Amino acid sequence: MQDYSFNEYFERFPIAMAYVPWQHLTSIYEDLEEGYCNGTIFPELTKPFTGRRCVNP
């Protein structure tokens, strides 16, 4: 393996690109305790981990 400095190593890779859709505020949890347990106060962002991928409940 070739010995690269930190900067030389990361200069070999392209800059990442991301697609982030606009989020529209539609509602919030009326019971903030429920929102706290879900990790968000926005119901549309509640995506429980199912072991493979996130799904809407």
Image (spheres, rainbow, N blue to C red):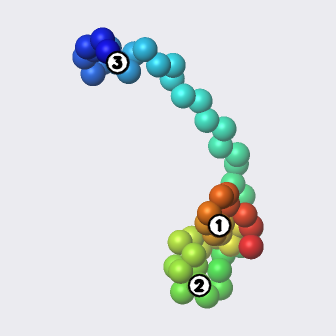
Dot 3 or dot 1: first in sequence order is: 3
Residue that badge 3 annotates: 9
Q: Residue at x 51, y 19 (%)?
A: 14
Q: Which label was assigned to residue 34?
A: 2
Q: Amino acid at mark 3?
A: Tyr
Q: Residue at x 72, y 63 (%)?
A: 55
Q: Could you say which quadrant of the image residue 18 lies in?
A: top right
Q: Residues within 10 Å of mark 3 (few under 14, many from 20)?
A: few
Q: For residue 32, which quarter of the picture?
A: bottom right
Classify mark 2: residues with Cα within 10 Å, few (<14), some (14-19) or many (20+).
few
Q: Position of residue 48 (x, y in %)?
A: 63, 69
Q: Are marks 2 and 3 in contact (CB under 8 Å)?
A: no
Q: Callout 1, which amino acid?
A: Thr
| Residue ranking furthest to the front | 1
Q: CA distance from mark 2 to mark 3?
A: 45 Å
| Mark 1 nearby-residue class (10 Å; few <14, some 14–19, many ≥20) | few
Give the residue drawn at x 61%, y 88%.
31
Does 20 appear above or below 17? below
User: Measuring 43% from the left and 14% from the top, which residue is drawn there?
Assistant: 12
Q: Nearer the viewer, residue 6 or 15?
A: 6
Give the CA distance from mark 2 to mark 1.
Answer: 19 Å
* Residue 26 coordinates in the image, percent (x, y): 74, 67
The residue under label 1 is 50
Task: For mark 3, give the secondary structure.
Answer: helix
Mark 2 or mark 3: name the one nearer the start of the chain.
3
